[in-house]
Structures are given as C-alpha cells and as structure tokens.
Amino acid sequence: MAQSSDPSLPSPGARIGFLRFSPGTSRLNAYTYLYQSFVAIALFSFLSFAQPYVLSEVLGIPAGEAGRLTGALLTMQEIVGLLLVGYIGALSDRVGRRTLFALGFVIMAVGYALFPFATSSAELFVYRFIYAVGVAMAGVIFAVLAADYPDESSRGKLAGTGGLLNGLGVAIAAVAFSQLPTLATTAGYTSTEAARMLLLGVAGLALVTGIIMQLGLRGGTPGRRRERVRLGTTVRVGMAEAARNRRLVLCYAGAFISRADLTLVATFISLWLQQAGRNEGMSAEESIARAGMIFGIIQGSSLLWAPVCGLLLDRWHRLACLVVSLGLAAAGYTLLGLHEHPFAPTGIAAAVLVGIGQMSVILSATALLGQETPVDTRGAVIGLAAFCGAVGILSTSIIGGFLYDHWRISGPVLFVGAVNFVVFAYGAWLWTAEGRPTRFSAAEARSGTAALPEMAH
C-alpha cells in the first residue's frame, strides 16, 4: 500500500534498535534525544557536586559555615524552580521545545563559568541564580521531551533506556571531571585555578550541548498549528487536566515523592550512614567508605533495574506498575530506616530495594504522565509535575533536616518511606476503582489527543 502524500500528516517516527520514536521524529532527532539523556542530568547536578570545592578552595569558607551556605543556595535554586517551571512548561506549548531547551543549557553555561570567579557569598547567590534559571528552563523541557519523543508502544523502553543513560552520564561526569583538579594541581596550578578550570570545562560542555539541541531536535510543537493557544489559556487548561484526571493526580504525587527520593539519597542517606558508622566506632574515613558503598549499591541497583523496568512498562498496565513501584519504594525506605546497623547484610538488601523502588517510581510516573497528557497541553501539565517535584525537594529538605536533628538520624529515611506509602495507598485505591487493569494497551493513551480542539488562536 502506498503511503499517503498528505504533507499535513507527520512522517513515521525513527526506529533505533528496539526503540520506536513518535511520528515526525527523524534519526537525527532521535540520536539527539539519546545524547541529551546522557548529559542533561549530569549538567543539572554537577554544580552541587563541585560547590564544596569552590567554597573551600576559592572563597576559603570554613567547614562550619559551608553547610548553612550550601542549604541556602539550594533553597534559593528550588524557589526559582517553583516560580518558573509552570510558566516555562506552558510557554513550550506555545513556542516549541527546541529553542527553550537550548537556551536553558546556554544560561547554565553562563552560571557554571561565573560561579568559580565569585569573590563573596553575595556573588555566589547571583551566579547560582543564573544557573538556577537555566536548570529550571532545561529541566522542564527535559521532562516534556520524555513525553514527546517515544512512540506509545515504546514509551516504557525509552524511559528505561533514558534512565540508564542518565545514571551513566552522572557517573562518568563525576569520575572524569572530578579528576581535573588533581591533574591541574599536579601540573602546578593553584587550587583556585583548578576550580576555575573544572567549571569552565563543564560550562563548555553545557554550551556545546545547547548548540547540539538547537541543531538536532525537531522544531515546533507536537500539536498542529491550529492547536496553539494563548499562554494563559494553556496554563488554565493544564491545571484543569490535573483536576479532572485522577491518574494525573497520582503522577503529580509520584513526581513529588520521586524528586524527594533523589534529595534524600543525595543528602540525608549519606549523612545518616556516615554518622551511623561513627556511632559504631568507625573512623571518619571508614564511615565515609561504608556510606559510599551503600550509596553505590543504591545507584547501581537503580541503573541495572532501569532497562528491566522499561520493558515491564510496555507490557503491564502503567497505573499498576506505578502502584507496585510505590509499594517497593515504601518498603525499601522503611526497612532501611528501621535498621540500627545499616551496614549489616539485611541493610544492604534494603538498599537494593531502595534503588529498585526509586528508579521504578521515576520511570513509572514518567511513562504514565506521558501517556495521560494531551499533546497540546503537555508542557503545561508537565510543568505542574515539575512544580510538584520542586515542592518535594523543599519539603524533604526542611522536614528531613528537622527529623534528623530532633528525632532520629534515620528520620528522613522513614519520612520518605511513609510518604511513599501514603501515595501507594491512593494509587491502590485508584487502580481498584478502575477495575484492576493489568495489561498495557496503547489504545487508552491520551498522548495523541488534543485537549483544546476548538481553541485555535
């Protein structure tokens, strides 16, 4: 049968191995998408990794003051995200994804380049603010692209592949760039010069990535021209979609808790494990090594599980997958947090369960969100999900810090376990109310529909 020559219809999507992309996606677009999956999360997170080195070696800030300054900088960044993500998501439905994504990386590059040249704490806040704007812009579009680019039959597999590439990119960047200061000082440069060389190198990568995004991603929006609407209308409809679709409510709750999970693993679990090691009589060096081992087990199990989870998401009903994922995460965090001796074999087993549960929630929520989001309001809806994620980070940071100081050092871990359980309970109720579906069906997806068929301009 001859293919239709109607120029208004998108061309079939590219296929790379077992990954199928949405209609209108070329192979260049597809490879560009996979590239950004590899580098984006590393660029979103590397400044936090490098910041302690800048504080100590460039500004000479004492260790006793660095913690408070770090927390203030992180809080400021999340507030910027809260203020911007909904607007950026809605704007992407009107002007398209590509230029906003590329511009986000360019702004991040400016922030990276300026940060190690700060001469005061005030300048640090200014430069981190610039970086935060870039992260907010690129971060929202990163999530929108995860909904735009998969063919519905391959959404789970592409999410799993993306999760694997995310983790590999972070690991490789941490290893590669963390060696630069040592190499620089060995070559005779000062620590200050080494810090500047490090972040200028990352800034160069961010700038190049922005150029690649502009050249390699497809332009426009997934909806046709008639589906573009006023920005204010898009925001209102995006909120309405969340109000009337209970699956989206669960996705937003999943976004809240999955971002909270990431904050917990990166901040409080390592802090708790190091203190637990010292409580068991280990030296500081031994406790750091043991904490690093558990952290590595969590991240390693997440990476190894990501492709498996992706395959399951294209076979089993995605609502059911998200419910099971929340249950696994709730069990993992609760079991780990209840351990008085987390380095025991049962604690290691709980860490594996945490890694599997964490990755499962992230991928399941991403796949279900993409499936349930109409094409013309996708940016606004995912912008609201990003807003929920930012609230999750702030909530975990504030409540987790209080519990750590005033209850028990594993309190933040138990708190996230409890929140996972609450969201799991809502998801289980919703799954039961919908008749307990078990098999995936592309026919029920709303990703190819338009929420605003009659609002042309």
Image (spheres, rainbow, N blue to C red):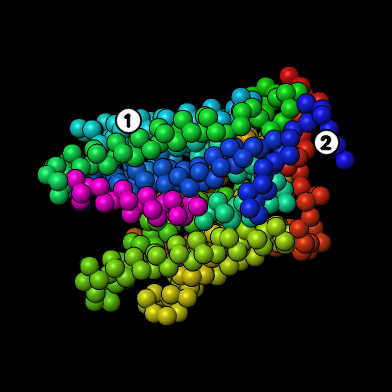
Instruction: Indicate the position of residue 318 as horizontal and vertical percent values.
Output: 70, 57
Callout 1 touching callout 2 (CB < 8 Å): no
54 shown above or below 228: below
Where is residue 399 shown, x and y percent of the image?
43, 54
430 in the magenta segment: no
On the question of residue 242 being in view, the answer is: no
Q: Is residue 423 above or below residue 57?
A: below
Question: Between 228 and 412, which is closer to the camera in this rendering?
Answer: 228
Q: Looking at the picture, which amino acid does disc 2 mark? A: Gln
Q: Give the residue drawn at x 38%, y 53%.
A: 172
From the viewer's perspective, tell me whether residue 152 is left or right of residue 74: right
Q: Nearer the viewer, residue 225 or 24?
A: 24
Report the magenta residues as a range: 165-184
User: Image height check: is 260 above or below 342?
Assistant: above
Which three-letter amino acid code belongs to the residue tagged 1? Val
- Whether residue 439 is visible to the viewer of this picture, yes or no, is yes
Tell whether position 181 is magenta.
Answer: yes
Quickly name the residue at label 1: 126
Q: Quadrant of residue 430?
A: bottom right
Q: Residue furthest left?
A: 188
Asked which quadrant contains residue 434, the reply is: bottom right
Secondary structure of the magenta portion, mostly? Answer: helix
Q: Residue furthest top?
A: 457
Quick check: 413 left or right of 282? right
Residue 225 place in picture, x, y as percent: 72, 23
Instruction: Give the class, few, some or many, for how many residues have Cα within 10 Å of label 1's Cα (few <14, many ≥20).
Output: some
Residue behind mark 2: 3
Q: Residues within 10 Å of mark 2 (few under 14, many from 20)?
A: few
Q: Between disc 1 and disc 2, whose residue precedes?
A: 2
Q: How many marks?
A: 2
Q: Secondary structure at mark 2?
A: loop
Which residue is drawn at the image coordinates 63% and 53% (left, top)? 17
